[in-house]
Amino acid sequence: MDRSLSKILSKLKVKYLFLAVAAAISIFPFVWIFIGSTNTSADITMGKMTIGNNLVQNWENLNKNGELLTVFLNTAKITVITAVLSILICSLAGFGFEKYRSRGTEIVYALFLLSMMIPFAAQMIPLFKMMNAFNLIDNHLAIILPNISMPFLIFFFRQNFKAFPNELIEAARIDGLNEFQIFFKIVLPSMKSTVAAGAIYSFMKQWNNYLWPLIILQTNQQKTLTLFISSLSSAYFVDYGPLMLSIVLSTLPVIVIFITMQKQFVEGIVGTSK
């Protein structure tokens, strides 16, 4: 009995030791970036791993032209609008594909899933020509519109709506509610964890979007945070202090949103796998 217990404890020690090492490796880049944001470029280059006193100077260098606030607001506007509209459109689409099945809807749904296999590199030129035809070059709408309907989110919502009982929908119809009232008053409020998970996915995808804004946005007044950070890192002489600080500032909103909605995110993902 003692031997079996000791074996179990030894296995647990190895398991938790492995998890601790993996967690340390995962967290280390964030700790290093945070420490680097408080040091000078020379200290960062030399590998200094202690908190410095250059945070204020890095902030002043980063925001000397007032550009940081502009790009932050641009990114926030694009991300919030995209997240709200994508949740609205994709949840309606997922609900429709699941609860109003027909041969035609299954074909359309299969085409949506097929589009997930097409790499973005194959879509860039047609998409750019389309936005140019709509006179949306260097316009935030050109970033928002292609991301409103996300095939993965439609698949995600449809999988979750499978668990919603059809009897409640039928009862609501008998009570006189139309289809939109059923969706917004009964279905959507009961799927808060699914909506939260979808919102986190959409937010993170758009917040970190780089390639398409790089192609479509052409002026500094319209650029996003990812493009701003890229411009800092591509300078002839890179000032690593402000660069590290900009990365910290760009990471904080994502961390805050994920931490505050972590429980709902996990519940939504688990619901999809059922």
Image (tube, rainbow, N blue to C red):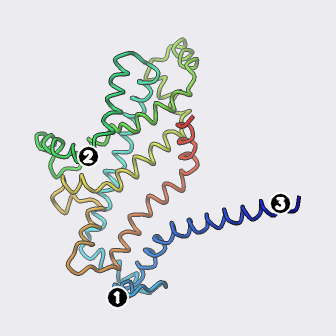
**174 over 55 or under it: above or below:** above
Residue under label 1:
42
The location of residue 45, given as percent across then percent down, is 36, 84
Q: Amino acid at mark 3?
A: Leu
Q: Residue at position x 88%, y 62% from top? A: 2
Residue under label 2:
120
Q: Residue furthest top?
A: 174
Q: Amino acid at mark 1?
A: Ala
Residue under label 3:
5
Q: Quadrant of residue 154?
A: top left
Secondary structure type for disc 2: helix
Query: In terms of depth relative to the viewer, which is nearer, 136 or 120?
Result: 120
Of tags 2 and 3, the one toward the viewer is 3
Of tags 2 and 1, the one toward the viewer is 2
Q: Residues within 10 Å of mark 2 (few under 14, many from 20)?
A: few
Quadrant holding the C terminus: top right
Q: Is residue 23 left or right of residue 130?
A: right
Q: Quadrant of residue 61?
A: bottom left
Q: Amino acid at mark 2?
A: Phe
Q: Is residue 225 left or right of residue 175?
A: left
